[in-house]
Amino acid sequence: MIRFDTDYAEGAHPRILERLAETNQEQTQGYGEDEYCRQAAEKIRGACKAPGADVHFLVGGTQTNTTVIASVLRPYQGVLSAQSGHINIHETGAIEATGHKVLALPSDDGKLTAEQIGEYVDWQALNDSAEHIVQPGMVYLSNPTEVGTLYSKEELTAISTVCKSRGIYLYLDGARLGYGLMCPGNDLTLEDLAKLCDVFYIGGTKVGALFGEAVVIVNDSLKRDFRYHVKQRGGMLAKGRLLGLQFLTLFEDGLYFEISAHAIRMAEKLKEGLSALHIPFYMESPTNQQFVILPDVVCQELSKKYAYEYQERIDENHSAVRFCTCWATREERIGELLKELEQLLLAYQEERSMEALG
Amino acid sequence: MIRFDTDYAEGAHPRILERLAETNQEQTQGYGEDEYCRQAAEKIRGACKAPGADVHFLVGGTQTNTTVIASVLRPYQGVLSAQSGHINIHETGAIEATGHKVLALPSDDGKLTAEQIGEYVDWQALNDSAEHIVQPGMVYLSNPTEVGTLYSKEELTAISTVCKSRGIYLYLDGARLGYGLMCPGNDLTLEDLAKLCDVFYIGGTKVGALFGEAVVIVNDSLKRDFRYHVKQRGGMLAKGRLLGLQFLTLFEDGLYFEISAHAIRMAEKLKEGLSALHIPFYMESPTNQQFVILPDVVCQELSKKYAYEYQERIDENHSAVRFCTCWATREERIGELLKELEQLLLAYQEERSMEALG
Amino acid sequence: MIRFDTDYAEGAHPRILERLAETNQEQTQGYGEDEYCRQAAEKIRGACKAPGADVHFLVGGTQTNTTVIASVLRPYQGVLSAQSGHINIHETGAIEATGHKVLALPSDDGKLTAEQIGEYVDWQALNDSAEHIVQPGMVYLSNPTEVGTLYSKEELTAISTVCKSRGIYLYLDGARLGYGLMCPGNDLTLEDLAKLCDVFYIGGTKVGALFGEAVVIVNDSLKRDFRYHVKQRGGMLAKGRLLGLQFLTLFEDGLYFEISAHAIRMAEKLKEGLSALHIPFYMESPTNQQFVILPDVVCQELSKKYAYEYQERIDENHSAVRFCTCWATREERIGELLKELEQLLLAYQEERSMEALG
Amino acid sequence: MIRFDTDYAEGAHPRILERLAETNQEQTQGYGEDEYCRQAAEKIRGACKAPGADVHFLVGGTQTNTTVIASVLRPYQGVLSAQSGHINIHETGAIEATGHKVLALPSDDGKLTAEQIGEYVDWQALNDSAEHIVQPGMVYLSNPTEVGTLYSKEELTAISTVCKSRGIYLYLDGARLGYGLMCPGNDLTLEDLAKLCDVFYIGGTKVGALFGEAVVIVNDSLKRDFRYHVKQRGGMLAKGRLLGLQFLTLFEDGLYFEISAHAIRMAEKLKEGLSALHIPFYMESPTNQQFVILPDVVCQELSKKYAYEYQERIDENHSAVRFCTCWATREERIGELLKELEQLLLAYQEERSMEALG
């Protein structure tokens, strides 16, 4: 089985494994208070040009979202998210399990707009029954989104402005941040994120690490006692240096950006190939996730050799599916996948022609 | 100010106050373990023809919804509700505060259908990522709904069937149940509810009591230790007999139905009057809540003497508003309100004609 | 059955019932935003000489404790309480259900000391593993305590000082506050409480009301959006005026203090009588709760006519029990109870003498 | 700095790192549904002789305790634990954050007894106010305990029996289970645990893995939908195979037991050395944790070269401290530590003699 279903099918970038092996016998203090975590945090502050930011390392994305969001909100507050946001549909209610409502807003492209955020916040605040309605306390964005789209600097700036004007916090989930930053059309930098967001995270799990996400807290009022939150939510790794070492490796020589760029090159190659095959796209995405619409019979055949992620039913005979590239994607595999698709589609068209002639 | 905004503007039916005064010096055991609670529970079991049901008395609606729902669900489960459901939009996230997601489904008339429930449950259960998605564990219906509509026996039977077939629980919020039961077109009885639902509540606050809701648990598997839940969620009244006495008064001679019928007669009179004035209805409702669309300037004038509830903006110059009748509504007040509306609308039309001539 | 087990066996002071009856047909706005609530809040601010305090009315004690504590604490914080504190042992884990640990400290008399609070807070803050330990964020005191003891002004001042110096909040549960304030030896006033506590509540349920507790928030930083908390925790009564009316009645002519003083006179009479019978006290209490140690056989006989509350086993043949007086206690009942006890103890002693003689 | 403060100062057993490197480029399905997890689960079932058990892999201990406990309890239930239990004092209220009270029972040696469990459960169940008291729903034991003590088979059997008789669940935290199993005096096996407990976990983090804990669910009624709980609590690792691979390596050739035995040999050597130096033990422990009482000045000197864990103050001049051995402890280091201690104690005694001579 060749997997294009996710960007976390392989282990870690080899340099990370080497680093783990080299330092294996060292003894360090636990719980993220070691030298590697300190160095990695410093590298990340440097990359974000945010010398005053707090950086914390957690193990996975759901844990990170839950810990950050629960640390920010007051009990009667909720978090605004696109309907398609990971916290709204793919975390088994982890946010609600900490007592907070996810306030889902409609979105066609996985993104929120400054306008819809402003309108919702004002509608609640000015409502006659305001106290009976969950108060939005923060905004959750993912960038890239769950459907592979990206925020522009202009869009994120507008959202940041509307959040500040309403006194609510802005949080960005960067599970696939590297892939977003290295897209050709992207105009956002880590420095921009540090200026526009109150808190965000740089994803490692999907971008070359074995696991790990680096939370960057920029707003001073969100920094207090964050390690208590991490411990309480089960995210404080005993051997915390494993996280520090990985992020140090990713951020000391630009490895994070280099491997992200590779994935995007692979995605572009895939995208071009899919276009050339006249396969319709479900969502236009510049990132490492490509969403297309395929006949169900093609999907079925394809799944004998290739893993893709099922997205949703389009009509009686078609479905949307996702192909992911990542830091580990080998170029020849893209070619093989495209070839396979070409043959399956050809066979499918022939069969349909036969039926039509039937 | 004459209030038509809610059905809880007055105190309680006089017979309830008399009863409280008569028994005031009696000493009873606390926390709902007194003779009045026992008798009231028995009366309600009788009215529901459900001799095996457990009946518990709580103080208010949000508390009741929270306590029941949190008692039923497993931590990773959520509750299906219409988008417009009270638990979804008017309880400040009380359900989420107990750790559970409200799974809101779209609805034009405040009602869920058996079909959409079945589809959602199946979609989640059969999803490749099922474990990453909140599992629906129960259905929440309100009857009458928040927009004054009613479930028919056929509809509720279909929902009950789909719930049973999928192994999820059915809960009905009867905050205004009396008003629903006494509507001319209604074909549901308390006995039907006890057969079709796993648990439901009979509202007192809006139907003649000072406060109080009677939870009827029909399904044996939901009965265990319910009083622990009530205590933990803050709903166990020290002088529990106050609840028992009120429901005993409402249910021993049919008072609950009698006063509900009065409210419906008042609502019909109001509805006829509104129709006669050619005021467009926002929602067709047979119950004690009537929703109409009025010009904003009419609303503004009206609000100097009459309280109504603002519903939502319809267009630049019109809004939807709610008028409620209740057990305490005096017939002459309906006439006065209609007269006032007539005059305001006449003035409005004249002004508009003038403008048009302008 | 004549009840001395609790102070909430009767209904309400007759003046409260009269008031409810008089205003029954009035229409008011819901959820505590009516004129009666406003007036009652003003009266309470006056009684506390705290013109800037926010006053909110909730239905019951567990609900009040939960709402206040959950509104104050950050997620990783806990509340310090005496081991015997109501929140620790008699609220079915309601505090924990909102996510917070009750940090129980040992106490022989139901009271905490400034010293033990300071020591605990410092121990946690200075601990090498501080982030692995729940951080104390507030102190919960009950006054009178659950075992009938009282804080002196000196003790409460010391606790207030230690709380301020450590940056933690002080909350006082005054479920039986009236009875405490009217004890002969008491030197605390409502004004003192408003100066020394950040937030406290004045109990109505046990002191003459049908139900209701008045939360007084003195510290500005705890005031924000408190009504959201009340709504979310299920404590916002639809007909909120019922609470306002009751507290207005209790606080406009000093009724609260007058009826509390009556209960204390009754308790003193009872205490003198128990002493005269040489019945050993389990706890020395100046308040309306009297705790004595009785032979089990005496308890058993007594319970045929009189209700008391069982406290705990003392030895194989003796138990501690509680007798409560309250605003409604009739003086002749005290005499009857004492007479009954005298006879039962006499019979018991005779029987024991017989046995000794064998 | 040479660390004896914890048993998680190093990385992982080299065979684990090799395995990770070998499989690094393989593509596997995510979230623990890969072949390595399946094989590891099978090995563990084999080691426990529990073919019907469910085995799940989580990242860390606090996460595991939280997930298991929250999956077992009903909302109004709590978990019985020794006062010194990890969940009670070292997890920042993670259990309470899921809504459940830790019911802490006193213990001198970190262990609970069947008798005290039975007494507590019966006291609550038979209490007049049972519904006002948190209901014990399960028992939490750690073995070895936090103070290095062990349950005997007889003790655990008695506890299991009392749990079954009262209908409450038994959960054993085996963060250091390997070290317990390999102690000379230990008479418990994995098979015994699987017979006596409803659910337990085999710790990897402290016993040779980079991280990871293997939950073994024996009782069928606790198996349902456990993966939903894991996902919701943030414990479902995207690259789940990292956990599977580690446990497979530990359990396929007995590596887990072999390295545990090494740690115990090191601990025995340390213990003998400490005894020979006449250093008083704070707690008699047969396990890899040794607790002794040292003069503060000795501690201070020692900490310049050696890391130990501070336990608690014993008197004005002495403290209890912990030394841990582990799978990675090198024998020569034990000798060096003992030598250092010998010299420091000698110097201390000389100084004290000088002072005494004055």
Image: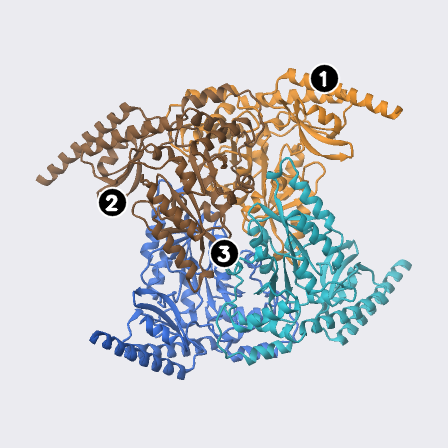
Chain colours: A cyan, B orange, C brown, D blue
Question: Residue A313: image x %, image y %?
Answer: 75, 55
Q: Can you identify the residue that label 1 sits on?
A: B339
Question: Residue D67: image x %, image y %?
Answer: 51, 58
Query: Mark 2 Cα within 10 Å, few/some/many (few <14, many 20+)?
Result: some
**Label 3: element kind:** helix
Tell me the subunit letter for badge 1. Answer: B
Q: For the residues marked 1 and 3, what is the alpha-carbon distance in whole angstroms?
A: 65 Å
**Label 1: element kind:** helix
Tell me the amino acid under the disc marked 1: Lys
Tell me the subunit letter for badge 2. Answer: C
Could you say which disc has been placed on residue D222 in the image? Answer: 3
The residue positioned farthest toward the bottom in the image shown = D332
The answer to whether residue C64 is visible is yes
Tell me the amino acid under the disc marked 3: Leu
Q: For the residues marked 1 and 2, what is the alpha-carbon distance in whole angstroms?
A: 74 Å
Quadrant location of the C terminus of chain A? bottom right
Q: Can you identify the residue that label 2 sits on?
A: C314
